[in-house]
Image (cartoon, rainbow, N blue to C red):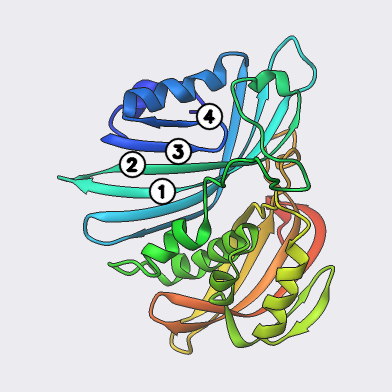
Amino acid sequence: WESGSWDLAKGLFSGNCQLITSHMSSHEGGREIVEAFKRDRAKTDVLSLKATNRYVGAAESDGAFSFYVFGQMNKATKSKGFGFGMTVTGSLKKTASSWHFERVLIALNWVTGDHSLATHWTLPPGDDGWRIGDPAPTIVSEIDSPWLAFSHSTPAASARESIADTYARYSWALDQGDMHLLSSCFADDAAGNFQPMGIIEGRHAIIGSFKEFRRPWPWMQHFADVLDVQADEEQGVAEMLVGRIIPGNSHAQDGTPLYGAHYRMRLRRKYEGFWQLTWSEYRPGWFSSNEAPKL
């Protein structure tokens, strides 16, 4: 998608793969899907993309995935580019020894900059969110969440992957307004320093506060990288350091990743492959990947 090397994508899609989007309608089959994505480069000289918040769950021959994407389109003759953020989810199918996309859902969450670079897109609702007459959302977490299909994978992921998945699940649930999924991310006795709300104790209070806090921001997306994980598997406890990515200011001039804040999170294993947060603390402050805080 980013490079335009679509010959590499021919084997990625099943024969009847469905692409359903909020911004460029629906398409079926690898050839039609590729042609739809090719249009993103029609008016641009540079397309840059970053994928974060990745999750994959799978059984023997079926899988589900989700990730976030933020990107920028630029035209050499224009000083102002076009930025955007997306949520992507879908299903996978394994045939022989290869995995293929079977269904892909993409929701365009927000845009900024020069809209003339993406006139082939239907732009998302404004900051006020959905209004009467707007189309129904492309992604409904309570139906489309990959954790609904695969709450834990077989064969089991490593402890580090399972712990990192907790942040992907937490950010997805909060951003999608899926309070049931969000509640599964926290232990009953969880607490945290949730800026700007402050210290909150107990899962009931945490979920209730997040539910009210989230309402005014339908475009919310918490892009992030898991920077470090330390786990005591014998005791079933862990710590995780997560760097908050700010689209539009995600890298220094030399390409070094930048972060606008970080989370310090503690977790407890509920059962094999499934961890819950017992403490979460959000600390604003810029840093590069070369000078990341330590656990």
Q: Quadrant of the C terminus?
A: bottom right
Tag 4: amino acid? Met
Residue 243, given in percent of the width and then of the height, sits at 68, 58
Helix, strand or loop at mark 4: loop
- Neighbour tally class for label 4: few under 14, some 14-19, many 20 plus, Cα within 10 Å: some
- Do the residues bearing badges 3 and 1 touch, measured as CB atoms within 8 Å? no
Rendered residue at 52%/59% (across/down): 141
Of the residues tagged 4 and 1, which is closer to the observer?
4
* x 64%, y 41%: residue: 134
Where is mark 1, residue-wise? 90
| Mark 2 or mark 4, whichever is nearer to me | 4
Please state which amino acid type lies under the numbered disc 3: Ile
Looking at the rendered structure, the secondary structure element under dot 1 is strand
Depth order, front residue of 95/29: 29
Q: Amino acid at mark 1?
A: Gly
Q: Are marks 2 and 1 in contact (CB under 8 Å)?
A: yes
Residue type, numbered disc 2: Phe
Provide the residue designation for mark 4. 24
Q: Which residue does the numbered mark 3 point to in the structure image?
A: 20
Q: For the residues labelled 2 and 4, say whether their Cβ atoms are less than 8 Å apart.
A: no
Q: Residue at x 63, y 62 (%)?
A: 177
Residue 295 visible here: no
Q: In this rendering, which labeled residue sits more in front, label 3 or label 1? A: 3
Q: CA distance from mark 3 to mark 1?
A: 10 Å
Query: Residue at label 2?
Result: 101
Query: In x, y percent, where is residue 260?
Result: 77, 53
Rendered view: 208 above or below 139: below
- Could one spot residue 42 in this view of the protein? yes
